[in-house]
Image (tube, rainbow, N blue to C red):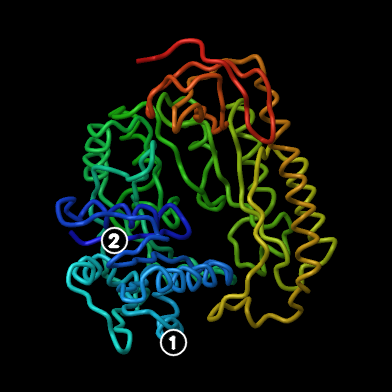
Amino acid sequence: MKSISIVTLGCKVNQYDTAVILNQLPKSKYRRVPFSDKADVYVIDTCTVTHKADAEARNYINRAKRANPNGVVVVTGCYAQVSPQELKEVHGVDYVIGNSHKFSSLLKIIREGKRQEEPKVFISDIFKEKKKGFESPDIEIFPGRTRAFLKVQDGCNYACTFCIIPRARGRSRSLEIAEILNRMEKLAHSGYKEIVLTGVHIASYGREIGTNFFELLREIEKEKIVNRVRLTSLDPADTELDLIDFIADSQTICPQFHIALQSGDQDVLKRMRRRYGPEKFLDLTDKIRERMPDAAIGSDIMVGFPAETEEEFLNTYEIARDSALTYFHVFPYSKRKMTPAAVMPEQIHPSEVKERSKRLRELGSKKKTAFFKQFIGRTFPVLIERGSKGTTPNYIPVRFDTDAFNIGDEVLIRINDVVNEEAIGVAEITNA
């Protein structure tokens, strides 16, 4: 039996891709082992959103060679797609497989691949392949997860000045609605009670196949295959107020939103080539709070974009502070080669970026804790994820007083306290 170790870096789309690979490996022939263990094959599914993501991938390559110098090391994903020559120079790499060949070549390499004197590269220009269709196979089991991710869209047609992902993932392409419903049925049959719809730019869903994201959600709501469907990040430019109304009335879509702000300053957004202004973001978040008072509203915020002044940063800080946001992820700007922002003048000094990031993260922690505390004394259905921990429909992590429940159970939990950005609760009634 061949041993294999796989690590996934980055977004939920990558996590879905890794799940596809694992679902297609026969359990009778392959044994998955931890990455620190000796394995016959190591697969690193990479991210390249930031320079830290690239460095993390290289670190895992080194770890693989230390664990087994004779193991076959395969690097795939976004870093492999964008920087194959750079990865070829990293000691210990045997194969570099871009996203363009992830599903056509990776499994064969896992089955038949051997150590190489010089790394072999499998890649094509994924963004120029205009006729490339949605090709991710389906899965029945999402290894290591209580909730299942379902990739319904891939790629992006836009060109934000800081973003390398269109080059890494290609143009937007979508899975047909009927097939999405079929894949949801399979996951539900496997016991998953919550499904997370994911994509690179999920708001673009369906445009090239004659439909749209709103229509997909209507069909999902009509079928009610699972009780919980959660959405990943939405672009304010492609999210309308009627979608908020629909979700507010839904019995299926979880009251949790992730609206990608990036910056709260109009001029910075223009330099980023984002297609909305702060007003559109505020309209959306205000509408969510009006229609769904309990909803969690998150965002991504970038700090230190080229030429960002202190005044521009403060505009972002004030929107983060005063808006309906309940949590946000803070990302220091990371220069990516082949992007317009990488050659913009007035790159911000790292120490200033670090200081601004710290201020925003401290604000985010306060807002998240304040949001959680609103629900002390309230009871929520909590999906058990591990031991005595789970998550509410509005994305509050809860730790409670017993580990008597099984992973995947839904349990009524009364929230009694909030400690270290985590709700503390007591189990009341189990919903079988």
**Image position of 212 with respect to 76: above or below:** above
How far across and how far down the image is residue 304, in percent? 73, 66
3D distance between C-alphas at marks 1 and 2: 23 Å
Quadrant of residue 426 within the rendered picture: top right
Q: Is residue 328 left or right of residue 77?
A: right
Quadrant of residue 200 within the rendered picture: bottom left
The foreground one among 342 and 146 is 146
Q: Residue at label 2?
A: 4
Q: Is residue 54 left or right of residue 206?
A: right
- Residue type at the position of mark 2: Ile
Per the image, label 2 sits on a secondary structure element best described as strand
Q: Which residue is most to the top?
A: 429
**Image position of 88 with respect to 213: above or below:** below
* Label 2 Cα crowd, 10 Å radius (few <14 / some 14-19 / many 20+): many
How far across and how far down the image is residue 300, in percent? 61, 52
Q: Is residue 293 left or right of residue 406?
A: right
Which residue is at a point 23% across and 49% down the rendered structure image?
138
How far across and how far down the image is residue 431, in percent? 39, 14
* Label 1 Cα crowd, 10 Å radius (few <14 / some 14-19 / many 20+): few
Task: Pick the quarter of the image with the N terminus.
Answer: bottom left
Which residue is at a point 67% across and 40% down the rendered structure image?
325
- Residue type at the position of mark 1: Glu
The answer to whether mark 1 and mark 2 are in CB contact below 8 A is no
Q: Residue at label 1?
A: 89
The foreground one among 91 and 296 is 91
The number of numbered discs placed on residues in the rendered structure image is 2
The foreground one among 11 and 254 is 11
- First in residue order: circle 1 vs circle 2: 2
Task: Pick the quarter of the image with the C terminus.
Answer: top left
Which residue is at a point 29% across and 29% down the rendered structure image?
225
**Image position of 42 with respect to 116: above or below:** above
The residue mark sitting in front, 1 or 2, is: 2
